Amino acid sequence: MNSKTVRKYELIVGIAGGEDALCKIQELCAIDFQTAFEMWEFALMRGREIVESGLTFFNSTSETRTRQLFCESIPLQKLVYSSSEAARPRVIEYLANLILINKLDTADECLNRLRTNTHLDFNEILRVVIDATFALYCQRNNTRVPVFNKKQKTLMQDHVNKMRGPNKALLLQRIKEI
């Protein structure tokens, strides 16, 4: 066993032991990205509130690998979007990004998790997600009006139809106008 492997296991033991989890995970990421990602999931399962900071860190380290691992892990999607931290800006932006890059199955799962989240008002959080999706599209494409494909529109409309309240009609109208 080389020194890199020894350090990897020391960090894993430190995370499991409850030491400063995010710092240890960040250090582990330099050694082994996938193991660090799995340890982040492990820390979330143990109740540590590092959803937004972990997602931000991994996304900035390797957006492609983060997206791939996130899309493959239904338990992680559940942990992230069923927690009280799901309403944080970076977590909402990540979901909006999934919609924009056509990872619609994963986005659908995440939206379903948001609907079952008892810590949040689904009607309000869905409005925030759709606003973030529109804003992110306009920012990336330097335009004032977003353009979505039929599958993206259908996904958003399906979830808006599941909500109640004054935002429903407004959101449906906004989606139909684009």
Image (spheres, rainbow, N blue to C red):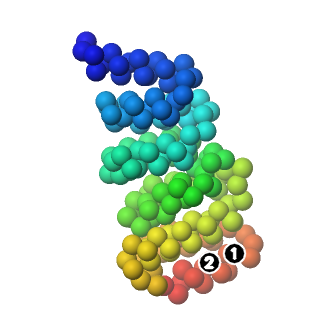
Residue matched to label 2: 171
Q: Is residue 75 above or below residue 122?
A: above
The numbered disc on residue 167 is 1
> Circle 2 — which element?
helix
Q: What is the three-letter code of the residue carrying label 1? A: Asn
Crowd class of label 2 (few under 14; some 14 to 19; many from 20; radius 10 Å): some
Q: Position of residue 163 (x, y in %)?
A: 68, 67
The numbered disc on residue 43 is none
- The answer to whether residue 108 is seen in the rendering is no
- The answer to whether residue 24 is seen in the rendering is yes
Task: Tell me which residue sits at (54%, 80%) in the image.
Answer: 175
Q: What is the three-letter code of the residue carrying label 2? A: Leu
Task: Tell me which residue sits at (61%, 39%) in the image.
Answer: 49
Crowd class of label 1 (few under 14; some 14 to 19; many from 20; radius 10 Å): some
> Circle 1 — which element?
helix
Q: Nearer the viewer, residue 33 or 161?
A: 33
Q: Is residue 88 left or right of residue 95?
A: right
